Image (cartoon, grey):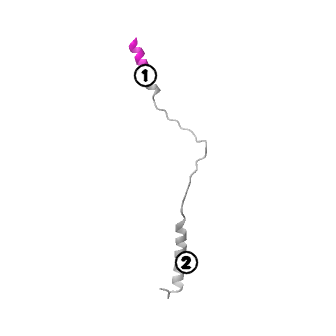
Amino acid sequence: MIKIISILVLLLSVSACSPTVKVAVPTEPITINLNVKVEHEIRVKIDKDLDELISSDSELF
């Protein structure tokens, strides 16, 4: 009888420790923060302006 009770206690303790996985919908909306530097646009504009200036006045260089 003691063996049966100890086996039952062991089984209950093992089943109580089993991990559970819960999938739930978030209550707040998901936000994506995009901190992007737009430094390359300025460089392209300056490069185009310099190319036009150099091609129009080729005596500079």
For image coordinates 52% across by 68% down, the residue present is 40
Prevailing secondary structure class for the magenta stretch in the rendered image: helix
Q: Kindly identify which residue carries mark 2.
A: 49
Name the residue type under label 2. Asp
Residue 20 on image: x %, y %? 49, 32
For image coordinates 43% across by 18% down, the residue present is 8
Q: Secondary structure at mark 1?
A: helix
Is 20 part of what is drawn in magenta? Answer: no
Name the residue type under label 1. Leu
Above/below status of 31 relative to 38: above
Q: Residue furthest bottom?
A: 59
For image coordinates 54% across by 80% down, the residue present is 52
Residue 58 marker: none
Q: Earlier in the sequence, mark 1 or mark 2?
A: 1
For image coordinates 42% across by 15% down, the residue present is 5
Is 9 part of what is drawn in magenta? Answer: yes
Q: Kindly identify which residue carries mark 1.
A: 11
Dot 2 crowding, Cα within 10 Å, few <14, some 14–19, many 20+: few
Residue stretch rendered in magenta on the structure: 1-11
